Amino acid sequence: MATVSSLGSGSGLDLSGLLKNIMQAEQLPLLTLQKQEASYQSRISALGSLQSALAALQTAASSMVPGTGVTAGGKYATFGAVVADANIATATAATGAVVGSYSLEISSLAQAQRLVTPGYGPGSGATTVIGTGDLKIEFGTLSGGAYTADSARTKTITIDTSNNTLGGLRDAINTANVGVSATIVVGTAGAQLILSSSNTGLSNVMRLGGTGTTPLAGFDYDPASDTGTMTQAAAQGGQAATNAAFTLNGIAATSSTNTVSGVLDGVTLNLLKQTTTATTLTVSKNTTGNLTSALNAFIKAYNDANKTMSDLGAYDAASKSAGALQGNSTLRTAQGQVRNLVFGAIAGGTSPYQRLSDIGVSLDKNGKLSLDSAKLSKATTADFESVASLVSTVGTAFKNTIEGLVGTTGSIASATDGMNRIVKDLTKRQTALSKRLDAIQAQYQAQFTSLDTLIAGMKRTSSYLTQQLASLPGVTSSTQ
């Protein structure tokens, strides 16, 4: 509505003040609507706070539930593996490991094959010219003196006049990406080409030889007979491929790599060094760490949600102030459902651990949860699987129940939608009323303007008549 400023200047009456007072009275219904809207907006915001607090609790509850295909015990148990001498080997353990101690001896480590050419003479280097033709590089398995090539790991490299140098062959092998790296070392014997397998073990052994109508000569090796122009002899810089060989509790095992899994259930070994005496591998199981963390996270989320709900529904008699959702049915429903679940969720079965209170979770007079870690530890020691199952059951119950509150079709969403519709209606009514008030003000202002003009005219007429009467013959001044 427009502000009135000059109204009454002609009549000398406080018509602006009068119009202002009239319009303040006319605005009372609009102010009522605005207060109603503010109240609903406050409740919508409070429902958002309730939604957030319960969603956080649902997240904490969901983290207590095992994933698909995982048992409750498998989710909460953690395994550790330690090798007494960490210079010899390290180990990790996962679900499926068996608690115990094992004697570990390592007789050999897995090695990658390395082949070396003879030296090309003093002064030679990467630019040393070699022949042209095709070189076939194969990878396969060497067992008992017999070699079996793997056709999927075979590569033929062509050397022509554009790359027929030692460096050209090196680059062509590296570009082929066949599982071998090529380098050139220049020593006292001149340049030597070194081929190193990218993988360890007897299943990654190289065989080289010229092939086709123009075979490349000077770069051949037969692993079955350990012969060829190239050599894996250690004295000449080469290295034979070997498997790792070790024993666990006296039982022999081998591996093509030094990272060994599948030999001991749930345990992965990383072999580092040959042993002269046995060392000890210890596998342990922790049944309280993950459970404690999950329960503490759940308890914190519950306590936060409980405080939020209490604050939203509280009433302070001293200050006569109420929470934004005091008396709200949606809040009462949420409080009731959540509180009833704390000790209402039951594991079932014959285990003595049926409720959260049985494993150390307690509730104080203010509705705040806490955890007795000693009682939890005692329970997991007595029956870990039942305790884990109980925690999973509670998590599932809270997850599903809260979904009915915070889900897209839940009670909080429904209540919020209802309030938003009311706010929308209130906004429309305020807009319509504001337009009506503008019209009323314009009408009053027009009427008061006419009155102001009329009175101003009458005052001018009165003044004129007074002057005329004073000038008539026989009319004397009041001062005479």
Image: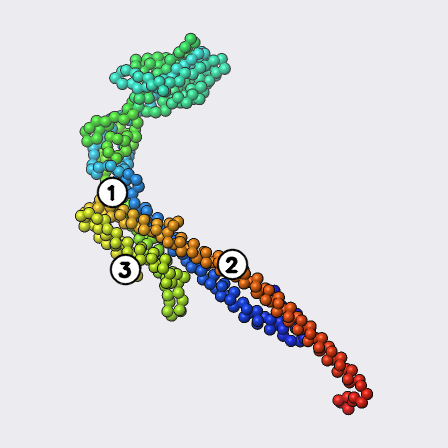
Residue 372 at least partly seen: no
User: Compared to 130, does 352 lie above or below?
Assistant: below
**Which circle marks residue 73 in the picture?**
1
Amino acid bearing label 3: Asp
Query: Which disc is residue 364 wearing?
Result: 3
Residue sitting farthest toward the right = 473
Q: Nearer the viewer, mark 1 or mark 2?
A: 2
Nearer the observer, 374 or 185:
374
Q: Are marks 3 and 2 in contact (CB under 8 Å)?
A: no
- For this orientation, the residue located farthest to the bottom is 480
| Quarter of the image where one finds residue 131 | top left
Q: Are marks 1 and 2 in contact (CB under 8 Å)?
A: no
Mark 3 vs mark 1, CA separation in Å:
29 Å
Q: Secondary structure at mark 3?
A: loop
Q: Nearer the viewer, mark 3 or mark 2?
A: 2
| Residue located 45% across and 56% down the image | 420
Mark 1 or 2, nearer chain start = 1
Compared across the picture, whether 156 is left or right of 4 comes to left
